[in-house]
Structures are given as structure tokens and as C-alpha cells.
Amino acid sequence: MRYIKEFFLYHKKISFFFFFLFFLYFGAMLSGRAVESSAHITPDYPKEEIIQIFLKEKINETDYKKILFQTGLGKAAVDQLRETKPKIENTDYAQYTAWMLKIETIQESFFQEIDFTHKANTFISCEETLIDKDGNRIEGIKFVDLEDGDILVTKCSRVYGWRNGHAALVVDAKKGKTIESVVLGENSCIQNINKWKYYPDVMVFRLKGASKTYRKKIAEWAIQNLENLPYRFSVGVLSNKEGKEGTIEGTQCAHLVWAAYRQFGYDLDSDGGKIVTPKDLANSSWLEVVQLYGVNPNEPWK
């Protein structure tokens, strides 16, 4: 009789376990649909002419704000584009035309109506990707020239109804390389930046007031110290966020970016909590906007 009771008790536990897993999966499906619309925000205002602003000898804060809302480009990117404006010599307008076309293409992409789908990357999480009318993956953001040390953030990764998002650190802008802690079960590694072009929203940030050389040093330190670390979502809760005796033994996407900058004295965790999230990075007062895509310029991630 005792063995019979144990048999039924065992199967009861197994049944409960599978019911619990089904409940988690079903809950993920329902809550996921509820937040799916926030993966991309298309401007609800008209597109306007902006090339003439770029051609001004000097531009003011009102000009910068208008460009931001028309292209998603922050002050750093605008100044960078203005510095690279070709000089018109004689009747050779090829480079000048290409320069204007680059700006117009960024603006077109910023206003373009898009569609997207989602795919699972773990049992309880998924990420969104842009698709065309035939369901083929397509590119969205048209990146300005990125620099080593730039930070990429997207909302387009979620667990249930929580948009945990994803983050990466640009470590070789010329070759299009980032360092990322991607998903549970995989170690942090060097990735190709092209995958970021398929997200329905992307935010690019840069350390305020720091030279290009200094930001490159941060990227180099990240490669030397933060590559091939195990993914640990609980870092900061079950272990010290700073690492054990200064050594990082595990990380996750936002924590990796935070750890690189923390090494140089910058705490990018905007709410100062135990866990660093991509949202914390996006709201850091140490960072400035380089480029936004698929988010509200007034509130990139609030």
C-alpha cells in the first residue's frame, strides 16, 4: 500500500510540474501579446525638410531638437555629419549628393512604417525582428558612423510581459564588432553589429565629454576582461555586482556594459539597484544620445 501511495504521489508531483510549465508558457504568450506593440514607435507627426538646417553655419538647440525628432540623430551625430560635409568644388557634386542622401535615408528609415515578428531565444523569452510583407527579415535603422565604446540598447527582448531588453558595447566600429552577453547558457563573446539592424527599435549612446581615444581604451579593456564570461542573470543579487576582489566571474548584457565603464569610474546604473538593466543604461545621466530608432525621442525608455 505504501508503494502505491508513493507512486501516485510521485505522478501527482510530475503532473503539477508539467502543469506549472504549461502555465508559464501560456502566460508568456498572453503577456507577450500585450506588450508587443511597444517594440516600435513610428512618429505620429509629419516629416519635414531638414537639409537646410544641416547647411547652416551655426545651429542652435531648437535646430538640434528638430533634427532629433525628424531623424533620431542626437547632437553628437549631427555635429559629426556636419563636420564631414564635403566642399563643393567646380561642378563635381557626387560626394555632396551622397552626403545629403545619407541624411535623407536616415530620415526615411526613421519615418517608415514597419512590421515585425518575434522568435523565442529561450523557453520563456523572445526577441522581435523586422520583416517585410512576405515575412523575410529586413533592416531598419540606418546607422551613422559609430565609434569604439558606443553603447547599443534595444527594448526588443522580453520575458513574459517584461521588456528586459538587450545591450551591447561597440569594440571595433570599423569592423562592426560588439561584445555582448547574449543569452543564458552562452558565454559573452564578440558579435557582428549587423544583427542590430533587424531590431524594431535601437538606441545608441555615448559617454559625454570623453575623447574618442579614451572611449577606445574602455572598449579595449572590455575585450581583454569581459569576453568568454558565463551568462549570469542573477549577478548583483546572488553575487557582488562589482565582482569578487575586482574580478568579474559572470555577467549579463547590461552588466557587461556597466562593468566596462565602472572600471574607469563611471556608474551607468541610473537607479543604483543591485541588478543593472538595459533600461538603466538608457537613462544614465553619463550618456548622451547618438541615434534613436523606433522609440519616442521625448522618452526613449521611461
Image (cartoon, rainbow, N blue to C red):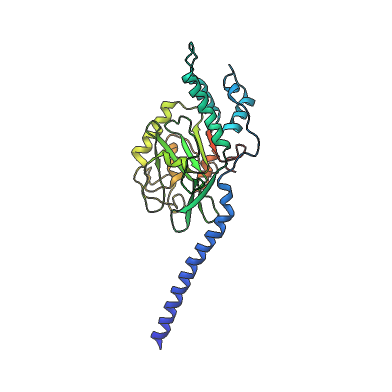
Q: Residue at x 49, y 52 (%)?
A: 118
In this view, the residue in front, 143 or 117, is: 117
Q: Residue at x 35, y 40 (%)?
A: 225
- When asked about the image quadrant of residue 215, the answer is top left
- When asked about the image quadrant of residue 46, the answer is top right
- When asked about the image quadrant of residue 168, the answer is top left
Q: Is residue 285 visible?
A: no
Tell me where residue 202 appears, x and y as whole percent: 51, 40
**Is 60 positioned to the left or the right of 130 in the image?**
right
Tell me where residue 3 appears, x and y as whole percent: 38, 85
Q: Is residue 92 above or below residue 260?
A: above
Total tally of numbered discs in the picture: 0
Q: Residue at x 55, y 30 (%)?
A: 74
Q: Residue at x 47, y 55 (%)?
A: 125
Which residue is farthest bottom?
1
Quarter of the image that includes the C terminus: top right
Q: Is residue 71 above or below residue 133?
A: above
Quarter of the image that includes the N terminus: bottom left
Tell me where residue 119 appears, x and y as whole percent: 47, 53
Q: Is residue 241 above or below residue 104?
A: below
Tell me where residue 283 appears, x and y as whole percent: 55, 40
Q: Is residue 172 above or below residue 272?
A: above
